[in-house]
Image (tube, rainbow, N blue to C red):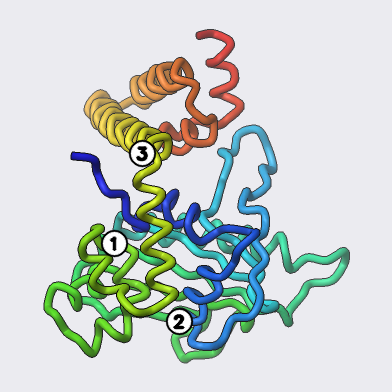
């Protein structure tokens, strides 16, 4: 039986919502998220510039200009401080890139970062908002805001059959529903039905299915090998073993013609280092 890939996967989310020729789904989705009518969405380049060869390629999930507001979205399937730190680094890089204009800094444009995070557990609030400020509440930077949705908590409403909460959060619940569940929640609403149709078409696409399953398998294997390599390196008290193992993983991925940025993501090597390995292999 084929796996049904939900919009919990960043690749699926981007394929469905980031359509420059038809922004309807993204506009309607953000209207519910931002709780105001969204009129215009302009997708911006989502690759953060590299300052030197030692850096990895950094690609964010979604970066867009939404009715004059800069919006950065990340789909997360893990928990812990490292995700917050990584996403905040990406967000501030985008902020720096867009606020500096010649010799002036733009303090008027609003910047919003949104995390949709699976893996936080059900005990926390559905939505948390963060600002850069003192413990007394004085804002350090006024035009940036971070929002995180606890997607485990959202999914709980569906399993508990909480009709009031399902109605309020169905635009979030739908992101991680299987085909039959999605058919039930989306009935009678154009936005939901168009999302359902598009994700079903995507899952019926053999090329996309093959590509997703291959990437998922490679990520699992690479992450497992990476964890084992670092564990072995810690036991030996050195890092060389870990580095060599990452190079070996990278070489195997190169043989399968894997995208360089994806190899960099799972191995921790820079693109420049990977390019050197490609010449060796």
Mark earlier in primary sequence (3, 2): 2
Q: Which residue is drawn at 44% across and 57% down?
A: 13
Compared with 63, 204 (above or below) is above
Image quarter in which the N terminus is found: top left
Front in this rendered view, residue 23 or 124? 23
Residue projecting furthest to the left: 160
**Mark on residue 209?**
3
Q: Mark 2 points at which residue?
A: 32
Residue at horizontal 62 percent and vertical 83 percent from the top: 142
- Front residue (pair 113, 191): 191
Answer few, some or many: residues within 10 Å of disc 1's Cα (few below 14, many 20 plus, some between 14 and 19): some
Side of 45 where 167 appears, left or right:
left
Name which of mark 3 and mark 1 comes first in the sequence: 1
Which corner quadrant of the image does residue 197 belong to?
A: bottom left
Numbered disc in front, either 3 or 2: 3
Q: In which quarter of the image is residue 138?
A: bottom right
| Residue 231 in the image, given as x and y percentages of width and height | 24, 31
């Amino acid at each position: 039986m084929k796996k049904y890939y939900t919009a919990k996967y960043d690749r699926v989310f981007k394929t469905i919502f980031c359509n420059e020729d038809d922004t309807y789904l993204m506009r309607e989705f953000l209207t519910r998220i931002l709780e105001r009518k969204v009129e215009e969405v302009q997708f911006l380049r989502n690759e953060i510039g590299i300052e030197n060869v030692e850096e990895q390629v950094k690609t964010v999930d979604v970066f867009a200009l939404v009715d004059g507001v800069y919006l950065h979205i990340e789909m997360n399937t893990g928990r812990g401080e490292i995700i917050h730190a990584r996403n905040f680094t990406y967000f501030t890089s985008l902020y720096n890139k867009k606020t500096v204009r010649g010799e002036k800094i733009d303090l008027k444009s609003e910047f919003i970062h949104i995390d949709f995070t699976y893996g936080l557990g059900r005990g926390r609030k559905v939505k948390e908002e963060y600002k850069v400020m003192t413990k007394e509440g004085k804002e350090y930077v006024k035009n940036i805001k971070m929002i995180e949705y606890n997607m485990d908590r959202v999914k709980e409403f569906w399993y508990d059959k909480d009709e009031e909460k399902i109605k309020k959060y169905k635009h979030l619940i739908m992101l991680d529903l299987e085909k039959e569940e999605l058919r039930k929640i989306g009935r009678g609403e154009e936005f939901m039905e168009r999302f359902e149709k598009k994700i079903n078409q995507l899952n019926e696409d053999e090329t996309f299915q093959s590509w997703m399953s291959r990437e998922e398998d490679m990520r699992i294997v690479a992450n497992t090998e990476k964890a084992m390599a670092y564990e072995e390196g810690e036991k030996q008290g050195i890092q060389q073993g870990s580095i060599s193992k990452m190079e070996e993983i990278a070489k195997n991925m190169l043989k399968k013609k894997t995208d360089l940025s994806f190899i960099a993501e799972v191995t921790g090597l820079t693109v420049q280092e990977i390019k050197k390995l490609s010449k060796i292999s």
